[in-house]
Amino acid sequence: MASGTEANLKKLVWKKIQDTIIKDTKDEGDWKILILDHFTTKLLSSCCKMTDLMHESITIVEDLYKNREPVEDMKAIYFITPTDKSVDALVNDFKKKFKYKAAYVYFTDYCPNSLFNNLKTYCAKYIRVCKEINIAFLPYESQVFTLDYPDAFHSIYSIYGMDKNTTLQNIASQLATFCACLDENPGVRYRREPLDNAKHLAQLVDEKLAEHYKIDDNNKGKGKTNTQFLIIDRGFDPVSVILHELTYQAMVYDVIPIENDTYKYKTKDGASGKEKQCVLNEDDELWVKLRHMHIAEVSAHIPKLVKEISANKKATDGKHNTIGALSQLMKKMPAFRKQMSKQTIHVSLAEDCMAEFQKKVEKLCKVEQDLAVGADVEGQKVKDPMRTLLPVLLQNYSTYDKIRAVLLYIFSLNGTTEENLNKLIQHIKIEDESKIILNWKELGVPILSSLNYQTRKPQRKDRSQEETYQLSRWTPVIKDIIEDATENKLDSKEWPHQSECPAAWNGSGAVSARQKYNKPSSIDDRRSGSRLIVFVIGGISYSEMRCAYEVSQASKSFKIYIGSTHIITPKHLLDDMQSLSKSKVPMDTFEVYEGESKA
């Protein structure tokens, strides 16, 4: 099993940056300027703090695209993506008059010859180092990564998409850097349904990995490591990304206005209260502890936090008569204030969630769960889904909430008639925005039952004996997939092998024709310390992220990483679905260029 540091993606990425960028430049012994573009700013922010950078002799962090004052007596580290825009900005720093004493250039990924030659022409005498370090992804959490590529959704699923093949090439290149960062050359598998995007991407990923691990210095190619890589298309489970989730993190991002992982709230001090904000990330230990709990459990935890806050306030109000007592208090004060602040944040956040729950979410969940599961809390099959849906349609819920309920109704039927769909669209008054429902077919999800093709619903695990809350009976499909993968139960017909998987991942349900069967005891031994990587094209939800942690904690024999092009909430996904009917100007992103590396 990988150690805690090695298993944590944030720590792993920061260590790689330290071992390459920092190590190269630290030997110089003087202070330096670090210059970042938009992507690398997010990347550094995800895995380190300014204090970490200062400890590594970096005194200033600058934006590559902003006007910067020359500092001719200092050296600059450029950590950037290999795009025309980024390289042009770097060249402009040295083309007419040099801004810095020297440049250390590090690209997140392969730099094409045209850009590399541009650097040589104008900056050769100033560049001390030029390397490609292969980190073209963001470590969002310890076991979650994203490619920061939300535009991929439109490109892949819209008829107005710019270039689907180029997008998949870009994704494959980024995924290859993820595997390289883990020093893994995994066996790649993909889910056959509902579309062929997963198959295409699996082929590209395998090609990129083969290219990356061509031949080492001893003329020995890197073979497949003890890791399996699963690729899935977003349409495999439309339910989990639409219904209201009641685990803390998923609920917060659904019902509370969170932007850039930032929660804004008011303190309850005095009559007015102060406006404050905090970032929800793994630096907050209490957030890590609470995020995957059900809101009922979090709410039960809140009174304890309130008591702690009250007790701590009383303690600080006490008299400290001696210099020694006062000195000890001052030493403890920063940590004490930080702890108090975190507790206050989660009291406020949990209260906001419960307010939404009592206002509307509780009633919505009852309908949504019955439609999603296909049975009520007593286990009785839902015979008339329309009757289940009606309470939402007839009451004063938001249009988004009604759309979500209608979609769950349609998913439960595996598609409805055109006549019935038109009535539903008219009832919720979205005639001009009907594509928000109709465009699900672009993901391979049946919306109209009259269509010739029908996507087969996945067979679900029986979880009737598991303890659960009545309003949280639905389990994301991805949890079934991850559990089946860890138990070697993935059907090779449904999950073809793009490349030969390591013998440790061959089980009775996962053996391909070219692979030999191994005894379960030897399989279990060889899988100890192995990794499972799951990638979803088109976005993952917070509830799906939670599943990777849950199965990891239950198995304890290996680490599970889950990632996607981006992270989605129900509202953002519905907005993206509507946009599939429109052309879209792509955001600035980096492209894949074929050729040999110069690093």
Image: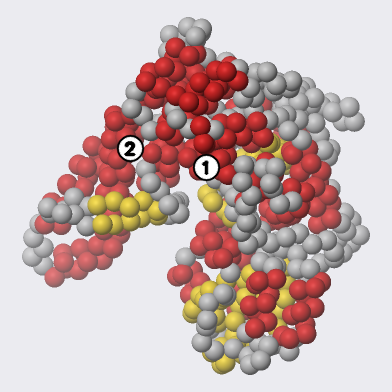
Crowd class of label 2 (few under 14; some 14 to 19; many from 20; radius 10 Å): many
Callout 2 secondary element: helix
Place of residue 159 in the rendered image (x, y in percent of width and height, measured from the top left): 70, 42
User: In the rendered view of the protein, which quadrant contains the N terminus?
Assistant: top right
Place of residue 375 in the rendered image (x, y in percent of width and height, measured from the top left): 49, 12
Picture layout, residue 27 above or below residue 529 = below
Q: Residue at x 11, y 63 (%)?
A: 320
Q: Amino acid at mark 1?
A: Asp
Q: Quadrant of residue 378?
A: top left
Q: Earlier in the sequence, mark 2 or mark 1?
A: 2
User: In the rendered view of the protein, which quadrant contains the C terminus?
Assistant: bottom right
Q: Residue at x 80, y 47 (%)?
A: 204
Mark toward the viewer: 2 or 1: 1
Left or right? Give the position of 561 relative to 325: right
| Residue tagged 1 | 575
Which numbered marker is on residue 353?
2
Q: Residue at x 66, y 71 (%)?
A: 85
